[in-house]
Image: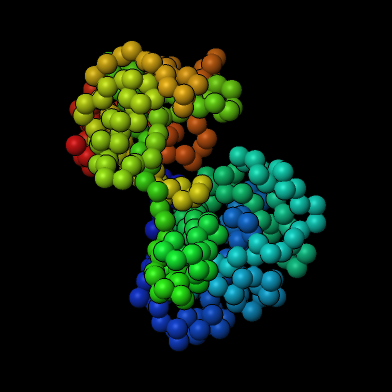
Amino acid sequence: MAREIVFASEWDDRRAEWRGDAEKQAALRNDSATRVLPVWRGRPLIAGADEARLAWLSPGDRVLDDADPAWLFLGEHDGAARFAADLSSWVPAGMDEAAMAAFFDPTEYTHPDLPSDHRFADLRGLMTRLDGVDAAMGSTARALFNWHGSHRFCSRCGARSESAEAGWQRVCPTCRAVHFPRTDPVVIMMIERNGRVLLGRSPGWVEGMYSALAGFVEPGEALEAAVRREVFEETSVRVGRVAYVASQPWPWPNSLMLGCMGEALSDEIVLDHELEAAIWVTRDELAQAMAGEHPVIRRPRNGAIAQELMARWLAGEIGFASGKGKGDGNAG
């Protein structure tokens, strides 16, 4: 049985029909039952220790006095409207800018006006500890704030744009162009041949870490074509059949990971500049790596779709050799 993929859960209702209703939005923001998730520099507010959860505040909480007034409306869940508010202007004591710029910063920041178990934490370290809906809502908030932060100016005329539709659009007040949140499709694929799968590692990764090959889908390119092109560009391995398996929203910064299986038509690996190494791995070797027992190969980070693809292949749930190459839906 396939496991639920991190960040892919659905909450009760996104209520898209309420986004452009100014009166409705104002009423929800003043409703004491509404809940607001503060997000500081991409880090959601978390409560609890062993069982971490998103920490939702009431709209009148004084912590939100420092938030950007353009809250994001996430929808409705458990009978309450849900918003996210950007608290990035707040500067905590002891903030380490250099550490925050790293791939993963485990530092957690507490706010003086909140309980001691409340802190702003990086989603990378929390994603497998959060409830599925919490992880999905935190990921969505982060992705939307990423987009607003990198699209402050109109791409048509260059004027500063403004948040609209409760955070789901930006509108240029000068030329009236409407801009929608950006999501970049990325194919990530398990390539199979003769009972082995192809894994690669990029320069700068933790020693021993290998993962499924991945790459951005180019304009005018079909999903299966992107799989074949990326694998050939990075390793010179030719791919024939391609099958879609599952997807994962990935907010670093704004991607949609499209998990696929691919059937290799050749074995020889010739690396390009993007990869440091690529290897064919047997089922037994992958099982060792997933168990943390392989002498060389380390598995991908918990929660990443690459690890899910590996687990499903090991379990015989996906793969052309097992006759289940179509995965959850066929891409070609």
Q: Where, quadrant-wise, is the N terminus in this rendering?
A: top left
Residue 2 in view here: no
Looking at the image, is 223 positioned above or below residue 26?
Answer: above
The foreground one among 206 and 116 is 206
Q: Residue at x 70, y 50 (%)?
A: 108
Who is closer to the viewer here, 31 or 222?
A: 222
Residue shown at the point (37%, 21%) measured from the top left: 235
Q: Is residue 236 left or right of residue 305?
A: left
The total of numbered circles placed on residues is 0
Picture quadrant of residue 282: top left
Which quarter of the image is occupied by the C terminus? Answer: top left
**Which percent across, then down, holds residue 188?**
37, 36
Outermost residue, top side: 268
Residue 20 position, x and y percent, is 40, 78
Q: Locate residue 283, reporting x and y percent.
A: 37, 19
Residue furthest front as drawn:
157
Which residue is drawn at the image coordinates 33% and 20% (left, top)?
236
Q: x, y (%) of residue 217?
A: 34, 41
**Looking at the image, can residue 180 be seen?**
yes
Q: Which picture quadrant has residue 278?
A: top left
